[in-house]
Amino acid sequence: MSLQCLGGRMDNNNGTKIKRTILHDLYEKQRQSPYYDNICIPVSDLHPLIASGIRGVTTNPAIFERAISSSNAYSEQLRELVEAGKDRENAYWELVVKDIQDTCKLLEPIYNEKDGVDGYVSVAVSPKLANDTKGTIEASKWLHKMVGYPNVYIKIPATNESIPSMKEVISLGISVNATLIFSLPRYEEVINAYLDGLEASGMNDLSKVTSAAAFYISRVDTIIDKKLEQIGTSEALDLRGKAAVSQAVLAYQLYQKKFSGPRWEFLEKRGAKKQRLMWASTNVKNPNYPDTFYVNSLIGPDTISTIPDHALQAFMDHGVGCRTLDAKVSEAQSIYNAIEKLGIDWSSVGSQLEHEVLNSFTKSFHKKL
């Protein structure tokens, strides 16, 4: 079986330009950029998705594991690498870098037309380095140089050890996708690392270095819903399915606060761009929730929504493209506080999820090798 992109299924196969979609409205009317959370094999399968309004691509170790294990598209390149004497890990990175380069090239017109606002492709450093500050810095520099395109985001996990790595990498002019953010305190650390990195940079013009902060959504509900069910009171059960979106709404409020005022205005005069919030894990894991739940609930300006296949199909079919992200801020704060009063510690949930997802990505990485 070959791995097919959603774009391949959306194409009408007669070369006709795909009509306007809700994704275009999302960007043009709501100023939110839809990114495809998957890799396309072949990369040309991304064309119909771009025509439908997709403005960037995100990947992770699990996505590449699925791509490599379920497709013969890599066979010829892998054979050449083996014959050239490459070891497993070097061969893997060459496969990945080639895919990222091809995707960056395809998205470069979007990057150029909006002065580097969109058109990015995210690729993660090895998850084995999540707790290695210096190793992450060196891997980020190497990966950025290997890809060689300005529209690549180097994904660095928001672990305690990798937060300083972000600051250093940003100061060197490398654009970063700060990933695996599950809590508000950790998100604020990520913002500060970005600002610190910009301030530490020796560049006069900061406009060429950008960043996104990937705040995870559905996984938060998965954990907190279980805790609410264990508590079992009517008050607790009534909060199911509300935690992730409420925290994300508050994250957007933090974003607006941190990217305003004298400190930010000084950096903005040097050309700095805001580190946009990127909604990650927008697929619905609980079948009792609507399949467009997380995408619909987090629509707002200056954000990125990363959308995997099933969520993208659902949203394009029956999504609602109106602004929702800051419609009920006080309600979101009340829900956040109520969950905390029940004895659920948000930071502990974030630490648990960080550990679980890093373990998952590390297993995917080893499985690929």
Image (tube, rainbow, N blue to C red):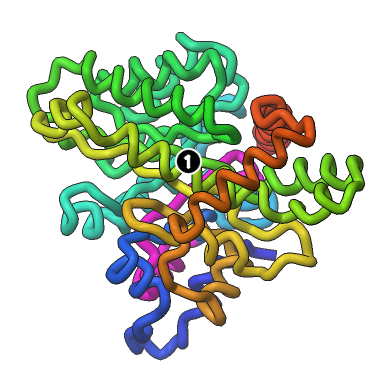
Residue at the image point whose x is 59% and y is 55% from the top: 282
Is residue 57 found inside the magenta-colored segment of the image? yes
x%, y% of residue 358?
66, 29
Crowding at mark 1 (Cα within 10 Å: few <14, some 14-19, many 20+)? some
Q: Nearer the viewer, residue 86 or 365?
A: 365
Q: How many marks?
A: 1
What amino acid type should be assigned to the residue bearing mark 1? Ala
In the rendering, at what x and y percent does residue 240 appear?
A: 76, 53
* Front-most of residues 214 and 120: 214
Residue 359 in sight from this viewpoint: no
Is residue 48 shown above or below 64? below
Q: Residue at x 46, y 87 (%)?
A: 12
The spot of residue 51 in percent (x, y) is 35, 74
Looking at the picture, how far across and down is residue 99, in whole percent? 44, 48
Left or right, 77 with respect to 151, comes to right
Residue range corresponding to the magenta coloring: 42-65
Viewer-proximal residue, 219 or 203? 219
* Residue position for label 1: 251
Instruction: Note whether residue 292 is visible.
Output: yes
- Residue at point 53% right, 13% down? 161
Q: Secondary structure at mark 1?
A: helix
Horizontal side, residue 128 vs residue 90: left or right: right
Left or right: residue 182 compared with residue 154? right
The extreme top residue here reads 134
Vertically, is 328 above or below 229? below
Give the residue at x 54% y 55%. 38
Compared with residue 115, is residue 8 higher up or lower down, i.e. above or below? below
Quadrant position of the N terminus in the picture: bottom right
Q: Could you tell me which quadrant the C terminus lies in?
A: top right
